[in-house]
């Protein structure tokens, strides 16, 4: 058995535009990114890519432009020079979270973007010693950086990969000018984000890994190390702004059919986290589930229970990869009334997945296919697509879902 895998090699560093450019170079259409921008309220922006070279290597450079074709990155508008750079605007984290939560993005794209921004916000809170709800995202709060994150989330979804890995993240540089003044490179937030993941040092005179780049890689990857074995299917190369002579300032993304255990094997690298709550409001419990998913949980759910003295309670649970377990335990301790959480390792058997689109009488709907070996055995229409068509065409939601299921059933025969 194989699974489609995506592996990142941040040879020269990592930034939002480098990651996005590499994914587009892999074959993600620009329209997929632009559609995601429109869904999150940034419809006046569009992605522009152009071929370039770094140390003689052909690569793509990505940037966002407005309706007049002007770059939206403040560094490009002002002609400043930086390693990768992320702008100088600021956005309150709660406001940005609401903007994404209330968008019409597909649920997987929305959750992936929230997970990246949750890591950014948590790092900023730690660096500045404030509560996460009071964080204002500065260098990563400009529209260009928001577009980077949303674009990356949409591009990864379009690739339909089941596994994402990454080389150790490079850290290096001298000093950078940000909203708070002159700081060591990489930015303190980038270093905070990389806690708990493999890193390596490189000698460069620019910021090689930005907070956006670090957050995207650590939120997306479920493992860090060498390229998995398998059959290589595609290579994409994204370029940073600088073109230093000593090192190719590029990030490489590779898609491959990676070797894996057969479909009867179980995964043992997951943890299940649980907490009993008998003194917490329903609103907080519901929001906690949303934050667990945004922070990287593979699933989160609540179950009613009865505790000592007959008190009604709820058990909040989360399933996560082992490297996310610590972060999610801290989230539960921080966000709920509990004084302790419990967790244990679990195994899980998974079906392979592939995303497709089907045609209905009211428009196209994304459908997730579950595969046993190479054979599709079940399907699930994307709810957000069905709801969008239901609202736009004035037809019952259940009719759109049923039509998408019928179209998908034809493909399974």
Image (tube, rainbow, N blue to C red):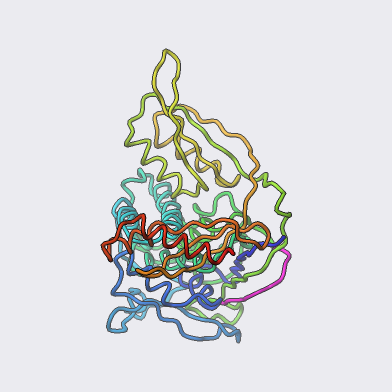
Identify which residue is drawn at 54% across, 36% down: 273
Is 186 in front, or is 241? 241
Q: Quadrant of residue 249?
A: bottom right
- Outermost residue to the top: 309
Identify which residue is drawn at 29% across, 61% down: 395
Q: Quadrant of residue 99?
A: bottom left
The part of the chain drawn in magenta is 228-237
Identify which residue is drawn at 36% across, 78% down: 76
Quadrant holding the N terminus: bottom right
Is 138 in front, or is 69? 69
Measured from the top left, where is residue 256 in percent x and y? 66, 69
Measured from the top left, where is residue 412 in percent x and y? 58, 63
Judged by its main secondary structure, the magenta piece is: strand
Q: Is residue 165 left or right of residue 97?
A: right
Q: Is residue 371 above or below residue 253?
A: above
Q: Is residue 180 above or below residue 42?
A: above
Q: Count the numbered circles shown.
A: 0
344 in magenta: no
Measured from the top left, where is residue 134 in percent x and y? 31, 47
Is 339 in front, or is 404? 404
Quadrant holding the C terminus: bottom right
Measured from the top left, where is residue 116 in percent x and y? 45, 56
Q: Quadrant of residue 9?
A: bottom right
């Amino acid at each position: 058995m194989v699974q489609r895998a995506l592996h990142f090699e941040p040879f020269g560093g990592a930034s939002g535009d480098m990651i996005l450019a590499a994914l587009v170079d892999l074959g993600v259409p620009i329209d997929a990114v632009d559609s995601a921008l429109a869904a999150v309220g940034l419809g006046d922006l569009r992605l522009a890519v152009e071929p370039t070279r770094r140390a003689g290597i052909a690569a793509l450079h990505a940037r966002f432009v407005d309706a007049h074709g002007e770059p939206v990155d403040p560094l490009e508008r002002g002609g400043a020079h930086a390693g990768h750079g992320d702008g100088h605007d600021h956005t309150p984290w709660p406001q940005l979270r609401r903007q994404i939560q209330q968008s019409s993005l597909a649920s997987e794209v929305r959750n992936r973007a929230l997970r990246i921004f949750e890591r950014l916000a948590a790092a900023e809170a730690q660096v500045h010693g404030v509560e996460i709800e009071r964080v204002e995202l500065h260098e990563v709060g400009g529209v260009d950086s928001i577009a980077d994150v949303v674009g990356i989330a949409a591009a990864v979804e379009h690739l339909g990969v089941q596994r994402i890995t990454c080389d150790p993240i490079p850290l290096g540089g001298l000093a950078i000018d940000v909203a708070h003044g002159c700081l060591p490179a990489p930015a303190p937030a980038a270093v905070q984000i990389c806690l708990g993941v493999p890193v390596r040092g490189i000698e460069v005179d620019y910021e090689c890994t930005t907070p956006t780049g670090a957050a995207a890689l650590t939120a997306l990857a479920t493992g860090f190390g060498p390229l998995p074995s398998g059959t290589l299917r595609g290579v994409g190369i994204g370029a940073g702004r600088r073109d230093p002579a000593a090192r190719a300032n590029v990030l490489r993304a590779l898609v491959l059919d990676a070797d894996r255990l057969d479909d009867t094997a179980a995964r043992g690298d997951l943890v299940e986290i649980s907490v009993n709550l008998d003194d917490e409001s329903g609103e907080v419990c519901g929001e906690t589930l949303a934050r667990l998913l945004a922070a990287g949980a593979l699933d989160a759910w609540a179950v009613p229970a009865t505790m000592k003295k007959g008190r009604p309670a709820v058990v909040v649970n989360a399933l996560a990869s082992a490297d996310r377990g610590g972060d999610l335990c801290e989230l539960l301790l921080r966000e709920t009334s509990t004084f302790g959480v419990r967790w244990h390792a679990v195994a899980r058997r998974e079906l392979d997945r592939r995303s497709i689109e089907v045609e209905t009488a009211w428009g196209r709907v994304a459908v997730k296919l579950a595969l046993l070996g190479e054979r599709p055995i079940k399907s699930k229409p994307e709810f957000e697509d069905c709801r969008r068509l239901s609202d736009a065409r004035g037809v019952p939601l259940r009719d759109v879902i049923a039509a998408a299921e019928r179209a998908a059933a034809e493909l399974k025969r």
